[in-house]
Amino acid sequence: MRIAFVSDAYIPVPCGVAVSVETLRLSLEKMGHTVYVIAPKYSGWKDTAPRIARLPGIFSPSNPHRPVIWPTSTVSRKKIQSLKLDIIHTHFYFNYFDLGSRIAKAANVPLIDSVYKIFPEHARINPPPLTGKTASFEKSLKKTIKYLNACDQVITPSRTSKKYLKKYNVSSNIDVIPVGIFPGDFSSFPPETVKEKLKIPIKRKLVVFVGDITEENNIKLLFRAFKKVWHAIEDVHLLVIGSGNKLHDMKHAIAKERFSKFVTFTGHMPKKQVNKIFGACDLFAYPGRLDPQPLVILESLASGTPVVTVEGMGAQDFVNDNEDGYVCAATVEDFSEKITELLRRDSLRMQFSMRSRASAREFRSSNLTSDLLNSYNDTIERFKNKII
Protein backbone atom coordinates (compact mmCIF):
# COMPACT_ATOMS: atom_id res chain seq x y z
CA MET A 1 0.00 0.00 0.00
CA ARG A 2 1.15 3.55 -0.76
CA ILE A 3 0.24 5.95 2.06
CA ALA A 4 0.76 9.67 2.58
CA PHE A 5 0.85 11.11 6.08
CA VAL A 6 0.08 14.82 6.36
CA SER A 7 1.03 16.24 9.75
CA ASP A 8 1.41 19.75 11.13
CA ALA A 9 3.92 18.42 13.72
CA TYR A 10 6.77 16.07 12.98
CA ILE A 11 10.40 15.42 13.97
CA PRO A 12 12.04 17.28 15.70
CA VAL A 13 8.93 18.70 17.42
CA PRO A 14 8.79 17.28 20.99
CA CYS A 15 5.15 16.17 21.07
CA GLY A 16 3.10 12.99 21.03
CA VAL A 17 1.80 13.53 17.48
CA ALA A 18 5.33 13.69 16.08
CA VAL A 19 6.26 10.50 17.95
CA SER A 20 3.06 8.80 16.77
CA VAL A 21 3.61 9.67 13.13
CA GLU A 22 7.18 8.37 13.24
CA THR A 23 6.11 5.18 15.05
CA LEU A 24 3.43 4.49 12.44
CA ARG A 25 5.81 5.28 9.57
CA LEU A 26 8.42 2.83 10.85
CA SER A 27 5.84 0.14 11.61
CA LEU A 28 4.19 0.36 8.19
CA GLU A 29 7.50 0.36 6.37
CA LYS A 30 8.64 -2.71 8.32
CA MET A 31 5.54 -4.43 6.96
CA GLY A 32 6.55 -3.56 3.40
CA HIS A 33 4.33 -0.53 2.77
CA THR A 34 5.49 2.77 1.25
CA VAL A 35 4.92 5.83 3.40
CA TYR A 36 5.34 9.48 2.42
CA VAL A 37 5.35 12.17 5.11
CA ILE A 38 4.34 15.75 4.31
CA ALA A 39 5.15 18.08 7.19
CA PRO A 40 6.20 21.66 7.94
CA LYS A 41 9.70 22.83 7.13
CA TYR A 42 11.67 23.74 10.28
CA SER A 43 14.65 26.04 10.18
CA GLY A 44 17.98 24.21 10.48
CA TRP A 45 16.50 20.69 10.35
CA LYS A 46 17.48 18.11 7.73
CA ASP A 47 15.80 14.73 7.33
CA THR A 48 17.75 11.52 6.89
CA ALA A 49 14.79 9.23 6.17
CA PRO A 50 13.48 8.96 2.59
CA ARG A 51 10.13 10.18 1.22
CA ILE A 52 9.73 13.13 3.58
CA ALA A 53 8.53 16.38 2.01
CA ARG A 54 8.84 19.62 3.95
CA LEU A 55 6.59 22.52 3.01
CA PRO A 56 7.19 26.07 4.30
CA GLY A 57 4.68 27.83 6.50
CA ILE A 58 4.24 30.90 8.67
CA PHE A 59 4.96 30.12 12.32
CA SER A 60 3.84 31.57 15.63
CA PRO A 61 6.34 34.09 17.07
CA SER A 62 6.05 32.36 20.45
CA ASN A 63 6.53 28.82 19.10
CA PRO A 64 8.92 28.11 16.20
CA HIS A 65 7.26 24.72 15.65
CA ARG A 66 3.67 25.93 15.46
CA PRO A 67 2.43 26.74 11.93
CA VAL A 68 -0.21 29.46 11.82
CA ILE A 69 -0.56 29.27 8.04
CA TRP A 70 0.50 26.03 6.38
CA PRO A 71 1.61 25.50 3.73
CA THR A 72 2.48 28.79 2.05
CA SER A 73 3.43 27.01 -1.20
CA THR A 74 1.25 25.07 -3.62
CA VAL A 75 1.39 21.33 -4.20
CA SER A 76 1.54 20.03 -7.76
CA ARG A 77 -1.55 17.99 -8.66
CA LYS A 78 0.47 16.17 -11.32
CA LYS A 79 3.17 15.25 -8.80
CA ILE A 80 0.60 13.98 -6.31
CA GLN A 81 -1.00 11.78 -8.94
CA SER A 82 2.40 10.40 -9.97
CA LEU A 83 2.84 8.94 -6.45
CA LYS A 84 -0.10 6.57 -7.08
CA LEU A 85 -1.29 6.83 -3.50
CA ASP A 86 -3.91 4.57 -1.96
CA ILE A 87 -4.83 6.67 1.06
CA ILE A 88 -4.19 10.03 2.79
CA HIS A 89 -3.90 10.01 6.57
CA THR A 90 -3.83 13.33 8.43
CA HIS A 91 -2.39 13.92 11.90
CA PHE A 92 -2.88 17.31 13.57
CA TYR A 93 -1.42 18.71 16.78
CA PHE A 94 -1.81 22.48 16.37
CA ASN A 95 -4.82 22.98 14.09
CA TYR A 96 -6.86 21.55 11.23
CA PHE A 97 -5.34 22.47 7.85
CA ASP A 98 -6.93 21.63 4.49
CA LEU A 99 -3.73 20.32 2.86
CA GLY A 100 -4.61 16.67 3.43
CA SER A 101 -8.10 16.99 1.98
CA ARG A 102 -6.74 18.84 -1.08
CA ILE A 103 -4.19 16.07 -1.69
CA ALA A 104 -6.86 13.39 -1.24
CA LYS A 105 -9.05 15.08 -3.86
CA ALA A 106 -6.11 15.44 -6.24
CA ALA A 107 -5.20 11.77 -5.82
CA ASN A 108 -8.85 10.67 -5.79
CA VAL A 109 -8.28 8.50 -2.71
CA PRO A 110 -9.89 8.30 0.76
CA LEU A 111 -9.05 10.73 3.55
CA ILE A 112 -8.49 9.43 7.10
CA ASP A 113 -7.83 11.54 10.19
CA SER A 114 -6.43 10.48 13.56
CA VAL A 115 -7.81 12.56 16.44
CA TYR A 116 -4.89 13.18 18.79
CA LYS A 117 -6.23 16.37 20.28
CA ILE A 118 -9.74 17.36 21.27
CA PHE A 119 -9.40 20.93 19.99
CA PRO A 120 -12.73 22.25 21.37
CA GLU A 121 -11.74 21.31 24.93
CA HIS A 122 -8.36 22.99 24.51
CA ALA A 123 -10.20 26.10 23.32
CA ARG A 124 -12.05 26.25 26.65
CA ILE A 125 -8.70 26.67 28.41
CA ASN A 126 -6.94 28.94 25.93
CA PRO A 127 -9.54 30.99 24.05
CA PRO A 128 -8.19 33.49 21.48
CA PRO A 129 -7.77 37.08 22.73
CA LEU A 130 -10.92 39.23 22.95
CA THR A 131 -13.29 36.22 22.71
CA GLY A 132 -15.29 34.44 25.35
CA LYS A 133 -14.60 30.81 26.26
CA THR A 134 -18.00 29.70 25.01
CA ALA A 135 -17.60 31.42 21.65
CA SER A 136 -14.13 29.96 21.25
CA PHE A 137 -15.36 26.47 22.15
CA GLU A 138 -18.25 26.67 19.71
CA LYS A 139 -16.04 27.93 16.90
CA SER A 140 -13.50 25.16 17.45
CA LEU A 141 -16.24 22.54 17.74
CA LYS A 142 -17.80 23.66 14.47
CA LYS A 143 -14.42 23.46 12.70
CA THR A 144 -13.71 20.03 14.20
CA ILE A 145 -17.06 18.57 13.17
CA LYS A 146 -16.78 20.03 9.67
CA TYR A 147 -13.33 18.55 9.10
CA LEU A 148 -14.07 15.12 10.54
CA ASN A 149 -17.40 14.77 8.74
CA ALA A 150 -15.58 15.44 5.46
CA CYS A 151 -13.27 12.48 6.16
CA ASP A 152 -13.94 8.98 4.86
CA GLN A 153 -12.72 7.50 8.15
CA VAL A 154 -11.81 8.80 11.60
CA ILE A 155 -9.41 7.08 14.00
CA THR A 156 -9.56 7.78 17.73
CA PRO A 157 -7.03 6.28 20.13
CA SER A 158 -9.49 5.76 22.98
CA ARG A 159 -13.09 4.74 23.57
CA THR A 160 -13.64 7.90 25.61
CA SER A 161 -12.64 10.20 22.76
CA LYS A 162 -14.90 8.30 20.33
CA LYS A 163 -17.81 8.79 22.72
CA TYR A 164 -17.03 12.52 22.83
CA LEU A 165 -17.06 12.85 19.02
CA LYS A 166 -20.30 10.89 18.72
CA LYS A 167 -21.87 13.15 21.35
CA TYR A 168 -21.21 16.13 19.07
CA ASN A 169 -22.57 14.44 15.95
CA VAL A 170 -19.46 13.41 14.08
CA SER A 171 -21.09 11.17 11.51
CA SER A 172 -18.04 9.65 9.79
CA ASN A 173 -17.18 6.06 10.60
CA ILE A 174 -14.96 5.95 13.73
CA ASP A 175 -12.53 3.18 14.65
CA VAL A 176 -10.76 3.04 18.01
CA ILE A 177 -7.11 2.21 17.33
CA PRO A 178 -4.44 3.42 19.79
CA VAL A 179 -0.96 4.29 18.58
CA GLY A 180 1.41 1.47 19.49
CA ILE A 181 4.85 1.44 21.02
CA PHE A 182 8.03 -0.57 20.61
CA PRO A 183 8.39 -2.19 24.10
CA GLY A 184 12.06 -2.95 23.44
CA ASP A 185 12.85 0.78 23.42
CA PHE A 186 12.31 1.06 27.17
CA SER A 187 15.23 -0.65 28.86
CA SER A 188 16.16 1.51 31.82
CA PHE A 189 19.19 3.19 33.28
CA PRO A 190 19.87 1.97 36.86
CA PRO A 191 18.01 4.18 39.38
CA GLU A 192 21.29 5.03 41.10
CA THR A 193 22.76 6.35 37.84
CA VAL A 194 19.78 8.63 37.16
CA LYS A 195 19.69 10.00 40.71
CA GLU A 196 23.42 10.56 40.82
CA LYS A 197 23.41 12.45 37.53
CA LEU A 198 20.48 14.63 38.64
CA LYS A 199 21.92 15.10 42.15
CA ILE A 200 18.96 13.43 43.83
CA PRO A 201 19.68 11.47 47.05
CA ILE A 202 19.72 7.74 46.34
CA LYS A 203 17.20 6.82 49.06
CA ARG A 204 14.48 9.18 47.88
CA LYS A 205 11.41 7.73 46.18
CA LEU A 206 11.20 9.22 42.70
CA VAL A 207 7.97 10.41 41.07
CA VAL A 208 8.30 11.42 37.42
CA PHE A 209 6.20 13.51 35.06
CA VAL A 210 6.99 13.71 31.34
CA GLY A 211 5.12 16.16 29.13
CA ASP A 212 4.48 19.78 28.27
CA ILE A 213 4.46 22.19 31.20
CA THR A 214 1.16 23.82 30.18
CA GLU A 215 -2.30 24.59 31.51
CA GLU A 216 -3.70 22.01 29.09
CA ASN A 217 -1.74 19.32 30.94
CA ASN A 218 -3.28 20.40 34.25
CA ILE A 219 0.23 21.01 35.56
CA LYS A 220 -0.88 22.95 38.65
CA LEU A 221 -2.67 19.84 39.89
CA LEU A 222 0.64 17.94 39.78
CA PHE A 223 2.46 20.43 42.01
CA ARG A 224 -0.43 20.91 44.44
CA ALA A 225 -0.72 17.15 44.83
CA PHE A 226 3.03 16.72 45.24
CA LYS A 227 3.03 19.27 48.06
CA LYS A 228 0.66 16.99 49.97
CA VAL A 229 2.70 13.90 49.06
CA TRP A 230 5.84 15.60 50.37
CA HIS A 231 4.15 16.40 53.67
CA ALA A 232 3.08 12.75 53.97
CA ILE A 233 6.38 11.20 52.77
CA GLU A 234 9.24 13.63 53.22
CA ASP A 235 11.79 11.38 51.51
CA VAL A 236 10.27 11.77 48.04
CA HIS A 237 11.36 13.68 44.93
CA LEU A 238 9.50 14.94 41.86
CA LEU A 239 11.27 14.82 38.49
CA VAL A 240 9.66 17.04 35.83
CA ILE A 241 10.82 16.36 32.26
CA GLY A 242 9.60 18.68 29.52
CA SER A 243 9.25 22.26 28.40
CA GLY A 244 6.24 24.45 27.76
CA ASN A 245 4.80 27.92 28.17
CA LYS A 246 4.34 27.51 31.94
CA LEU A 247 7.82 26.15 32.68
CA HIS A 248 9.27 29.49 33.80
CA ASP A 249 6.21 30.37 35.90
CA MET A 250 6.16 26.98 37.61
CA LYS A 251 9.89 27.03 38.37
CA HIS A 252 9.50 30.49 39.87
CA ALA A 253 6.47 29.45 41.95
CA ILE A 254 8.06 26.23 43.22
CA ALA A 255 11.25 28.08 44.18
CA LYS A 256 9.21 29.85 46.88
CA GLU A 257 7.97 26.60 48.41
CA ARG A 258 9.61 24.71 51.27
CA PHE A 259 9.73 21.57 49.14
CA SER A 260 11.55 23.27 46.24
CA LYS A 261 14.72 21.19 46.85
CA PHE A 262 12.61 18.09 46.30
CA VAL A 263 11.66 19.06 42.73
CA THR A 264 13.95 18.85 39.69
CA PHE A 265 13.09 20.46 36.34
CA THR A 266 15.15 19.11 33.43
CA GLY A 267 13.53 21.00 30.56
CA HIS A 268 13.34 19.18 27.24
CA MET A 269 15.37 15.97 26.97
CA PRO A 270 15.99 13.73 23.91
CA LYS A 271 13.36 11.02 23.68
CA LYS A 272 15.87 8.16 23.65
CA GLN A 273 17.22 9.42 26.96
CA VAL A 274 13.74 9.86 28.46
CA ASN A 275 12.88 6.29 27.45
CA LYS A 276 15.64 5.06 29.76
CA ILE A 277 14.55 7.19 32.71
CA PHE A 278 10.96 5.92 33.14
CA GLY A 279 12.10 2.60 34.60
CA ALA A 280 14.47 4.27 37.06
CA CYS A 281 11.51 5.94 38.80
CA ASP A 282 9.07 4.57 41.38
CA LEU A 283 5.93 5.84 39.70
CA PHE A 284 4.70 8.06 36.89
CA ALA A 285 2.17 10.80 37.74
CA TYR A 286 0.03 12.12 34.90
CA PRO A 287 -2.47 14.92 35.73
CA GLY A 288 -3.56 15.74 32.16
CA ARG A 289 -7.23 15.38 31.20
CA LEU A 290 -7.35 16.43 27.53
CA ASP A 291 -5.12 13.93 25.71
CA PRO A 292 -7.11 11.00 24.19
CA GLN A 293 -3.98 8.81 24.39
CA PRO A 294 -1.03 10.04 26.43
CA LEU A 295 1.77 7.93 24.90
CA VAL A 296 3.86 8.59 28.01
CA ILE A 297 1.51 6.36 29.99
CA LEU A 298 2.22 3.38 27.75
CA GLU A 299 5.92 4.21 27.76
CA SER A 300 5.96 4.23 31.55
CA LEU A 301 4.08 0.93 31.73
CA ALA A 302 6.49 -0.61 29.20
CA SER A 303 9.31 0.40 31.54
CA GLY A 304 7.66 -1.36 34.46
CA THR A 305 6.74 1.88 36.22
CA PRO A 306 3.17 2.07 37.60
CA VAL A 307 1.02 5.06 36.66
CA VAL A 308 -1.27 7.31 38.67
CA THR A 309 -3.53 9.31 36.35
CA VAL A 310 -6.83 11.17 36.41
CA GLU A 311 -10.08 10.68 34.53
CA GLY A 312 -10.35 12.67 31.32
CA MET A 313 -10.53 12.30 27.55
CA GLY A 314 -8.78 8.94 27.47
CA ALA A 315 -5.91 8.51 29.92
CA GLN A 316 -8.05 6.18 32.02
CA ASP A 317 -8.47 3.84 29.03
CA PHE A 318 -4.80 2.86 29.23
CA VAL A 319 -4.43 2.16 32.95
CA ASN A 320 -6.00 -0.89 34.59
CA ASP A 321 -7.14 0.63 37.86
CA ASN A 322 -5.70 -1.13 40.91
CA GLU A 323 -3.71 -3.50 38.68
CA ASP A 324 -0.91 -1.54 37.02
CA GLY A 325 -1.72 1.85 38.48
CA TYR A 326 -4.52 4.05 39.76
CA VAL A 327 -7.15 6.13 37.99
CA CYS A 328 -8.52 8.85 40.23
CA ALA A 329 -10.63 11.98 40.18
CA ALA A 330 -8.93 15.17 39.01
CA THR A 331 -8.73 16.58 42.55
CA VAL A 332 -5.71 17.37 44.67
CA GLU A 333 -6.97 15.09 47.45
CA ASP A 334 -7.56 11.98 45.36
CA PHE A 335 -4.49 12.41 43.16
CA SER A 336 -2.15 12.96 46.11
CA GLU A 337 -3.69 10.12 48.17
CA LYS A 338 -3.19 7.59 45.37
CA ILE A 339 0.42 8.68 44.81
CA THR A 340 1.13 8.53 48.55
CA GLU A 341 -0.44 5.09 48.92
CA LEU A 342 1.59 3.59 46.08
CA LEU A 343 4.84 5.10 47.34
CA ARG A 344 4.26 3.74 50.86
CA ARG A 345 3.32 0.21 49.79
CA ASP A 346 6.50 -1.20 48.26
CA SER A 347 5.13 -4.72 47.72
CA LEU A 348 2.00 -3.43 45.99
CA ARG A 349 4.08 -1.15 43.80
CA MET A 350 6.21 -4.14 42.80
CA GLN A 351 3.09 -6.11 41.86
CA PHE A 352 1.85 -3.19 39.78
CA SER A 353 5.27 -2.97 38.14
CA MET A 354 5.18 -6.60 37.03
CA ARG A 355 1.70 -6.17 35.57
CA SER A 356 2.71 -2.92 33.87
CA ARG A 357 5.00 -4.58 31.37
CA ALA A 358 2.37 -7.18 30.52
CA SER A 359 -0.21 -4.43 29.99
CA ALA A 360 2.10 -2.48 27.70
CA ARG A 361 2.69 -5.52 25.49
CA GLU A 362 -0.97 -5.37 24.47
CA PHE A 363 -0.10 -2.10 22.74
CA ARG A 364 2.76 -3.41 20.61
CA SER A 365 3.04 -1.35 17.47
CA SER A 366 2.96 -4.38 15.19
CA ASN A 367 -0.44 -5.47 16.53
CA LEU A 368 -2.05 -2.04 16.36
CA THR A 369 -0.58 -1.25 12.94
CA SER A 370 -2.29 -4.39 11.64
CA ASP A 371 -5.58 -3.02 13.01
CA LEU A 372 -4.88 0.27 11.23
CA LEU A 373 -4.26 -1.52 7.94
CA ASN A 374 -7.59 -3.31 8.29
CA SER A 375 -9.23 0.09 8.75
CA TYR A 376 -7.40 1.39 5.66
CA ASN A 377 -8.62 -1.53 3.56
CA ASP A 378 -12.21 -1.18 4.75
CA THR A 379 -12.12 2.56 3.99
CA ILE A 380 -10.72 2.02 0.51
CA GLU A 381 -13.45 -0.52 -0.23
CA ARG A 382 -16.20 1.85 0.95
CA PHE A 383 -14.64 4.68 -1.05
CA LYS A 384 -14.63 2.60 -4.25
CA ASN A 385 -18.25 1.60 -3.74
CA LYS A 386 -19.20 5.23 -3.15
CA ILE A 387 -17.58 6.26 -6.44
CA ILE A 388 -19.26 3.45 -8.35
Image (cartoon, helix red, strand yellow):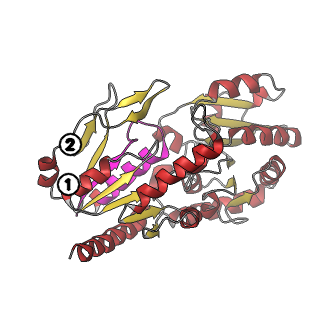
| Location of the C terminus (image quadrant) | bottom left
The stretch drawn in magenta includes residue 23: yes
Q: Can I make out residue 201 in this image?
A: yes
Establish if 187 lies above or below 253: below
> What's under tag 1, amino acid-wise?
Ala
- Residue 88 location, x and y as percent? 29, 57
Residue placed most toward the observer, 321 or 135: 135
Q: Quadrant of residue 197?
A: top right
- Residue 126 location, x and y as percent? 61, 38
Which residue is painted at 53% across and 53% down in the image?
141
Establish if 359 lies above or below 99: below
Establish if 240 lies above or below 296: above
* Residue 75: numbered disc: 2
- Residue 135 location, x and y as percent? 60, 44
Instruction: Indicate which disc, 1 or 2, sits on the residue closer to the N terminus.
Output: 2
Q: Is residue 299 left or right of residue 82?
A: right
> What's under tag 2, amino acid-wise?
Val
What residue is shown with label 1?
A: 106
- Residue 95 location, x and y as percent? 45, 43
| Location of the N terminus (image quadrant) | bottom left
The stretch drawn in magenta includes residue 176: no
The residue segment tinted magenta is 1-28
Q: Mark 1 and 2 residues: CB-CB less than 8 Å, in contact? A: yes
Helix, strand or loop status at disc 2:
loop
Establish if 330 lies above or below 46: below
